[in-house]
Image: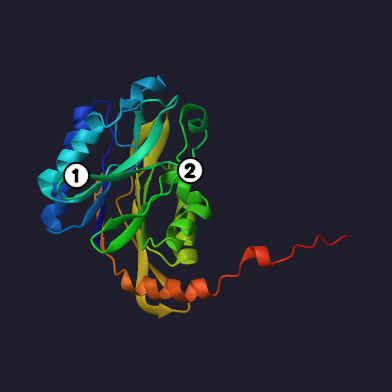
């Protein structure tokens, strides 16, 4: 699978955000003229201190922009995270849309694990979706969703062969984030594509450094990770071609070694 992350700087003007994404996309295609799917970061739009100003109608302007981009360039797209309100729902959702290369909406994944202030502002997702791209299957885990082992494991156990993660990680959390990504890849023997935000927001810096993590072929025990990174403290993109067959063999071996935790007894030893 030929995958890429586009890492734009978010601006205060949405039209500048749109222009930068398309500019980076053209540069990506000039260098790599064939790509199967592109992931955007969790936040690539302007941010307003008044939270309601950041929330769009369901399938609103940002949705339409990515939908048109997928159709225009004939590439499947993951929209990053869009904040949108829906009919008959009290709170809005944080969601990532998946468009095929015709610009058709295939589905969407709502953020399941809400982070910090998000818990009071948004409705959490209740369903983990498994999507298809050609003959391959994948899941979308938005930022905090990948910090917990349950969601990546559930996705992998239900057939996902690669995990995509639009994220918004500030500079102080980059080292932890890298550990999470590598751990999820190793414990599930599955490639991970994580696209991070770049820019400054509320006096916090988001350095980008998006990552595509896969496995070096023929390294079985121990497995060996291949990590390709996007630019640090700059806009840009990262691209890689991922072999999905070899990790499938690794997963088969690893999952045979899993012990059902419910079969184990826990004894609290007294001093």
Please say if 222 is above or below 47.
below
Task: Give the label, 2 or 1, closer to the camera.
Answer: 1
Q: Look at the numbered discs 2 and 1 and tell me whether their residues touch, using CB distance below 8 Å.
A: no
Q: Residues within 10 Å of mark 2 (few under 14, many from 20)?
A: few
Asked whether the viewer can see residue 72, the reply is yes
Disc 1, SS: loop
> Residue 127: percent from the left, percent from the top?
44, 45
Q: Residues within 10 Å of mark 1 (few under 14, many from 20)?
A: some
Q: Nearer the viewer, residue 264 or 196?
A: 264
> Residue 101: percent from the left, percent from the top?
16, 50
> Residue 250: percent from the left, percent from the top?
42, 74
Task: Report whether 12 appears left or right of 31.
Answer: right
> Residue 55: percent from the left, percent from the top?
35, 26
Please say if 231 is above or below 121.
below
Q: Residue at x 44, y 74 (%)?
A: 252
Task: Report whether 210 appears left or right of 222.
Answer: left
Q: Please give the label number shown on residue 104.
A: 1
């Amino acid at each position: 699978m030929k995958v890429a992350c586009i890492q734009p700087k978010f601006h205060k003007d949405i039209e500048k955000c749109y222009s930068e994404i398309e500019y980076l996309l053209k540069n990506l295609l000039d260098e790599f003229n064939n790509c199967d799917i592109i992931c955007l970061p969790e936040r690539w739009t302007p941010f307003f201190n008044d939270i309601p100003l950041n929330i769009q109608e369901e399938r609103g302007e940002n949705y339409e922009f990515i939908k048109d981009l997928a159709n225009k360039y004939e590439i499947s797209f993951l929209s990053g995270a869009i904040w949108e309100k829906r009919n008959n729902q009290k709170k809005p959702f944080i969601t990532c849309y998946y468009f095929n290369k015709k610009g058709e909406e295939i589905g969407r994944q709502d953020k399941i694990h809400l982070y910090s202030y998000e818990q009071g502002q948004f409705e959490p997702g209740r369903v983990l979706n498994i999507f298809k791209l050609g003959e391959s299957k994948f899941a979308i885990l938005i930022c905090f969703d990948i910090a917990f082992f349950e969601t990546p494991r559930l996705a992998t156990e239900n057939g996902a062969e690669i995990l995509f993660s639009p994220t918004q990680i500030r500079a102080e959390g980059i080292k932890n984030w890298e550990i999470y990504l590598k751990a999820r890849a190793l414990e599930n023997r599955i490639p991970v594509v994580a696209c991070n935000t770049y820019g400054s927001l509320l006096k916090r810096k988001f350095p980008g450094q998006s990552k595509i993590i896969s496995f070096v072929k023929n390294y079985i025990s121990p497995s060996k990770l291949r990590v390709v990174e996007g630019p640090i403290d700059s806009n840009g993109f990262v691209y890689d071609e991922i072999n999905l067959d070899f990790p499938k063999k690794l997963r088969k071996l690893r999952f045979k070694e899993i012990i059902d935790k419910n079969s184990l007894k826990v004894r609290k030893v007294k001093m």
